[in-house]
Amino acid sequence: MPATGDGRAPDATDDVGAAERSQSRRDAQRRSRPTGSAPIPHPRSTPGGSEPVRAPAADFRVLVIEGAGPEHRLFESLAEELGEHAELHRVNGVREAAALLPPPPGTGRRGVRHTDFQCVLVDLGAPGELPPGSDGLDELRELLQRAPHTAVVVLTDTAGAELGAAAVAAGAQDFLVRQDTAGPLLARALRYAVERKRADESQRRLVEAEIRGQENARLQRHLLPTPLLDGAGLAFTRRYRPGRRRALLGGDFYDAVRTPDGRVHVVIGDVCGHGPDEAALGVALRIAWRTLVFAGLTGQQLLTTLQHVLEHERRSDEIFATLCMLVLDAPGGDGEAESAELFLAGHPAPLLLGPDAPPVLLPSDQAGPALGLLPCDATQSTWPALRLELPPGWRLLLYTDGLVEGKVGAGSPRLGQEGLIDLIADHQAAGLTRGRLVDSAIAEVEELNGGALTDDVAVLLLERNPVPVIMG
């Protein structure tokens, strides 16, 4: 049974029946056209002249590459079956077809336009009609290289069925035996091959996009930090949600490390903007911050050096970054208050969560400017330290402004820090802690906003815990 475009055996059809069906279909098309519609406007004609009538552009172009054998009436009936909105270009051999096809990538001349064919029909003929020493597939392979995104259908003689199967294995969409094929069947097979080629191309692009997405996901996942808090006796919960769709990394960044002297350094920051450039800059600042901490820098000296990094890495002078840095001294005995230093560079102040009291917003009156907003030699470009005394069992919630800039209903004001305090207090009263507390807070902020937040969100919950470090 010959291979056909729809997988079924061909019906017995003569040329007279094909012509009658073609005429009936054209009559039906004319009857289905709307009447009384406005004519398509054309440019004004010059006095004494006439506007040439332009034929509508064909929506289905087929390139027929005929073989060395005798001509066949099959192609005339094919042109009738394809209809008036189709074009049939007949050439002799692939060499002649090369003038109509686009050149291989990287070898074409600029400004040269080529016909956009939806399908190529190659008549391989009978094995006896092939040139000496040719298997019939050499020119087909050249054609597939010249038109990699075009559907190709092969037509063979009865004795060349095996050749047709080899052509499909080489990359053609289908093959048909000429003696068993009529005009209607061939037209249907060509259109079927075009749709299957489009489906194959769509599937290929989908697979490539999935592979790129997986690679980007692995890359971005590895760019997120792993806090180094072994031996610190702290519970550390973090949540990170970029504002860009389908992204795993945004302009927000965070990190936490414990240095050999027993002190714990925590940072959370936000690069203005939401694109991949801002995400890359956030990663650069986070890596630079960790390197400077392990090099022994802290406070004003560290932030000044980090601003120099920002100034050299940013793509424009308008880019800046806010930052909150916390330095915890080595803890004393059980039940004793702990001391810490807080540095704010244009960043929202953290919340101090008590076990039996509502959250308290830490002071921000000593906050300095955002990094990159002022030159380092400016008198205002200083970041003084705020000394903190943390009570036993303390918890600190650090966050980026994406958490408080969501709206409370359509057209309402933003949540703000006061709204966040009330929200966290309600969730604490419900008995939520650690990851459940952070997740429920983010979920309610999104619900109040009426959907996902458009800005990046990073949230850190740091708390004194006598048990080993728990990563939330």
Image (cartoon, rainbow, N blue to C red):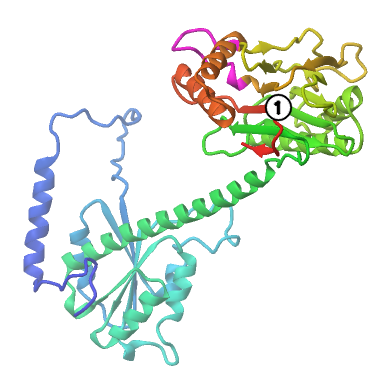
Q: Is 279 displayed left or right of 388 in the figure?
A: left
In the image, residue 296 sits, relative to residue 414, either above or below, namely below
Q: Residue furthest front?
A: 334
Q: What residue is disc 1 on?
A: 271
Q: Is 399 displayed left or right of 118 in the figure?
A: right
Tell which of 125 and 388 is nearer to you. Answer: 388
Q: Main secondary structure of the magenta part?
A: loop
Q: Quick one: SS at disc 1?
A: strand
Is residue 409 shown in magenta?
Answer: yes
Tell which of 158 and 195 is nearer to you. Answer: 195
The residue positioned 29% from the left and 44% from the top of the image is 56
The quadrant of the rendering that contains the N terminus is: bottom left
The residue positioned 58% from the left and 16% from the top of the image is 405
Name which quarter of the figure residue 410 lies in: top left
Residue 167 visible in rendering: yes
Given the image, on which type of amino acid does mark 1 rest? Val
State how many labels appear: 1
Tell which of 133 and 445 is nearer to you. Answer: 445
Q: Is 84 displayed left or right of 402 in the figure?
A: left
Name which quarter of the figure residue 75 lies in: bottom left
The residue positioned 41% from the left and 54% from the top of the image is 202
Looking at the rendering, the stretch of residues picked out in magenta corresponds to 402-416
